[in-house]
Image (cartoon, rainbow, N blue to C red):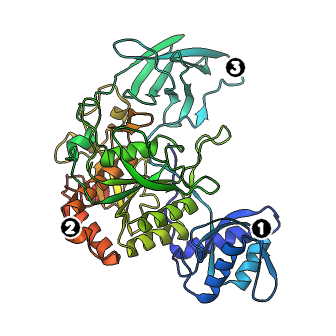
Amino acid sequence: MKTWRRRASQTSLVTNAVRSIIHVVETPKPQRVILLPGNRTLRAAASSTKEFLRAMATTGAAAVKSAGGADVKMKLLDSIHEDGAKLVEITAAEAQKLRAVQPGLLIVPEVFFQPAVQMYQVEKMARPSAARGAERKVVVKIVSQGDGHPVAGAQVVAFTNFAAREGAGGATSQNGTVTLTLPSTVKMLERLYVYPENSFWGSLQLKVKLASNITVELAPIDLAAEDSVRYFAGGGQVTDGQGVKVAVIDTGIALGHPDLRVVGGECTVPGEKPGDYGPLGGDHGSHCAGIIAARGTPPTGIRGVAPGAALYSFRVFPKPTPQNPEPGASNFAIAKAIDRAFAAGCDLLNLSLGGGQADAATEAAIQDARNAGAVVIAAAGNDGRQPVSFPASYDLCVAVSALGRIGLFPAGSVDRGDVAPPYGTDKKNFIAQFSNIGRELDCTGPGVGVISTVPDKAYAVMSGTSMATPAVTGLATRLLGKNPGLLNAARDASRADGIAKMVLQSAGKLGFGANYEGQGLPKG
């Protein structure tokens, strides 16, 4: 489980950005930074700044002449607009020179964000002490409940000390097994989590006595069963959300899944092909997209909250590599995706990600989206009752916490570990233990034990504020589709304010208190 930083003020953000450049004056190695117009939008307003940025875009040169004739040496990596934000490599010394000749630019460090999906991870390997150095091997086998077939690719996370996140883990092989190496002094696992890739519910076992071989059975997914999204938001009618365009800014959407209809998009990862907006960054974006607008019918498919919506896939997470198996999405890629999304006419932008430092580039993109009549709905984060993470903490986002309900997941599933007080007016309802909370919250949505679409033509269970956010986006889509006056209004800040107001005024309190649920659960 990743720890996310809190949001900084805009003033401190710029100051820290400059300090981060100046601090390494002695280091000649270039840094990747974003050059942002000083008017805090993705396009320049001042003519001198605009001309400077346009010159960079048109020449593609590694050195751009200043008005005084001196060269500012940098490498242009990507551009959001010809006269707007740029991603560059530049040394600290050249950055200082740039500030002297172009004081109207903000120098914003590149920062990275992660999907807001909940999965516990070992942060410290359990090792034998020097005095008692013996180890033991434990083979864990994961099989399907009922037929006993092995489950390959499942993540097994064994905690010897859950509070310290100490233990061992690994992925199962084709025969469904993984071998864990533990100190011989360990006699019991505090918790044993199993996270399958798809088709099954995850498993949580408590106080597991160690043996040479441990077998865990996983319950298969029943697509006709009611999960938290279907209970709280309901599967939509095929026409729900018609006329509304929704951007999923994430890992990409599975273009060939029978339950998903993707009408457009773009990959905004620097250095990757714009047309590669499929699920090359992972399964997460496909899962979010299915919650919003899956068009299937149980028992062979699933139905999202607003199946009539037009889905747009904006991939901001790079392709994983052996050297970087979980690459983060940069603030530049996210800002560019937000820009492309509202330019394509998207009404609602789903951001099931977070955890990076607050930055002027992401805030500028969100502000531009609001000015263009679009609303960003963002995940509060999964740090376990910590303050709302950025970008959800930014005032112009609709921030979403994660809600669950006892009885909507198998008794031995990983989701039972997410049940925690306070409980709602209905005592079966709870705000997930992992969910971030705070005064920045606007609403809550179902995000525990959610069944949705993943590549290739498969289904998986995930939990997180990542799942609660598209559930709220789906409800917002359904509401907007029923309000043609607002849907067809002039695309400006007043329209965006109207959409946000419509969603939040529809919400009903569930008895958790504003710090946990904001205005409550929106009703579509």
**What crowding class fits label 2: few (fewer than 14 Cα within 10 Å), some (14-19), or many (20 or more)?**
few
Count of number-bearing discs: 3
Disc 1 vs disc 2: Cβ atoms closer than 8 Å? no
Residue 215 is drawn in which quadrant? top left
Residue 488 coordinates in the image, percent (x, y): 26, 71
Q: Is residue 28 above or below residue 239?
A: below
Residue 341 coordinates in the image, percent (x, y): 44, 63
Mark 1 → mark 2, Cα distance in angstroms: 51 Å
| Left or right of residue 66: residue 480 | left
Mark 3 → mark 1, Cα distance in angstroms: 47 Å
| Left or right of residue 293: residue 365 | right
Task: Give SS at disc 3.
Answer: loop
Please, what is the three-letter code of the amino acid marked with disc 3? Gly
Identify which residue is drawn at 40% across, 33% down. 457
Please, what is the three-letter code of the amino acid marked with disc 2? Pro
Of 241 and 355, the residue lying toward us: 241
Q: To which residue does mark 1 refer?
A: 91
Mark 2 → mark 3, Cα distance in angstroms: 70 Å
Q: To which residue does mark 2 refer?
A: 484
Q: Is residue 295 above or below residue 480?
A: above
Q: To which residue does mark 3 refer?
A: 133
Residue 409 coordinates in the image, percent (x, y): 28, 31
Identify which residue is drawn at 16% across, 44% down. 426
| Label 3 or label 1, whichever comes before in sequence order | 1
Residue 334 coordinates in the image, percent (x, y): 52, 60
